[in-house]
Amino acid sequence: MFNKKWTVLLLTLCLAVFAAGCGAGGGTEGAGGSDKSSGSGGEGEKVTVNFMHLWPAGVSAGQNKIVNQIIEDYQNENPNVTIKQEVLDNEQYKNKLKVLSASNELPDVGVTWAAGFLKPYVEGNLFAPVDDLLSGELNGKFVSGTTEAYAIDGKTYALPLEFNIAPVYYNKAIFEQYNLQVPQSYEEFKQIVKTLSDNGIAPVALGNKDRWTGSLWYMYLADRIGGQEALASAISGDGSFKDESLVQAAAEIQALVDGNAFVKGFNGLSNEEAKSEFLNGNAAMYMMGTWELPNFTTNEEIPKEFRDSVGFFKFPTVDGGKGDINSWVGGPGVGLFISQDSKVKEEAKKFVEYFVTKWGEQSVTGAGVIPATKVDTASLELPQLYIDLFNEMNQASSITLFADVQMEANAAETHLNMIQALFGKAVTPESFSDEHDKAVSKGK
C-alpha cells in the first residue's frame, strides 16, 4: 500500500530538490501565534522546553552539531527560552519513550517514527495535533506526501525531518583486496560472502540485538523473491507471510547464517557495536538507512581514508524471483512530536516550527542527510556518495516502509522478536511465518 505513494513522493522530492528556485519563498522565521511568551522579542516570561532526541555526539556527530546550532540560534533569538536537551541513542530512546508515555511524562518535544509506531501514542492522546503548523510558516515546505505518514484520522501528529532508503554499503578496499565486484545477482552476493568468509573476513556487519537491523535483510529477501506486493500485502494483513516466497525468504536468512555471512555474535551485538566493525574495517559490508550517510561523507571524526573507501550497491535480485532491483526498503524517517500535556505547548510548537525550517538545508550541507522538506541544492557542493544515492532514489520503482514502523505496535514487537529468533535459528521459517500472520491478524 505504500509503494505507489512513496514512488510519487520520491519523484516529487527529486524535482523539488534539483529544480532551481523551487520552494524558496520568503522569510522563514517568525513567532506565529504563541500566547505564552514574547517570541523574537525575548522579553516574555522564562520558559523551558524539554527536548528529547536520538542524535548523540559520538554516533551522530553531524546531526548532533546541527541540533546544537539550531538550539543556540533559537535561544539567541528568544532569550527568554531555554531548550533543555536529553540525548539518547536509538534503542535507549525507544525504551525511554515507552516508559515516559506510561507515566504521562513525555518531554515537551520529542522524536517519533511514523505509521504504526505513532498510532498508540495518538490513541493514548499523548501527542498533540500539529496541523496548525502545516498551515502556517511551514505551509508548502514539505515534500508532497511526507507528512501523510504521520497522519491518523485526518490529523497530523508529527512533522517529518528525513527521508531514507537502505542500501548495502561496502568497503571498496576490502573488495579490491579480494578482487570482488559489486554483485549483480544474489548468487554473486553469496559467492562474495563465501570468498570473504574463507579468507577470515567478516562479510556483513549486523547488530541484531536491535532486531530491526535483521528485519531489513528479511524484507529485502522477501521483496526480491516474492515481489514488493507480496511483502506489502503480508504486512498489511491482506496477504500472508505463509506465502511460499516469503517462507523461502525466511529460509534464506538461515542459509546466510549457516554461510557465516554475519559478523560473529551478531544476535548479541547492538547496531552501534556492529557499525564499529564496519567503520574499523573488520567487516566488508553493512546494510543501513541513508541516515548513516554523514558517517561516510562529512563526519571528520571518521578517517577520510575510510570514508573515501565506502561505496554502496542495491540489494541484488534473486534468480527466478519477482523482485525489482529498484525496489527499496525505506520511507520517511523520524519526525518531531509535541506532547499533548506540555505546559509550554505554544512555545514548543514555535520551537518545532523553527527547528524543521532550519533542519532542511543544514541537514544537507552539514550532515548529508536527505530531508523531508524542500531544499534547493542546485548551488550546493555535495559528496558524490550523497548524489549517487539521491539519483538511486529518483529511479526507485517502489519503497516499502520499514516493517516495524508500518505494523501495529503488538504485531511489530512480534515481528522483531521473530526476526531475532529466525537469525538465531530458534524458529523454523514456517513457524516464523505463522507467528507473523497471527500477530498481524490480531491488529486488523
Image (cartoon, rainbow, N blue to C red):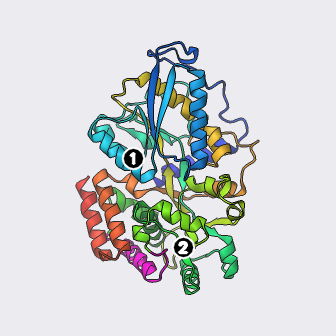
- The amino acid pointed to by label 2 is Thr
Whole-percent x and y of residue 295?
Answer: 62, 56
In the drawing, does residue 75 fall left or right of residue 154? Answer: right
- At mark 1, the secondary structure is helix
Image point (62%, 52%), residue name: 294
In the drawing, does residue 215 fall left or right of residue 410? Answer: right
334 relative to 80, above or below: below
The residue identified by callout 1 is 115
Q: Nearer the viewer, residue 168 or 177?
A: 177
| Magenta stretch, residue numbers | 242-264
The residue identified by callout 2 is 317
Q: Residues within 10 Å of mark 1 (few under 14, many from 20)?
A: many
Q: Is residue 260 magenta?
A: yes
Image point (43%, 73%), residue name: 265
- At mark 2, the secondary structure is loop
First in sequence: mark 1 vs mark 2: 1
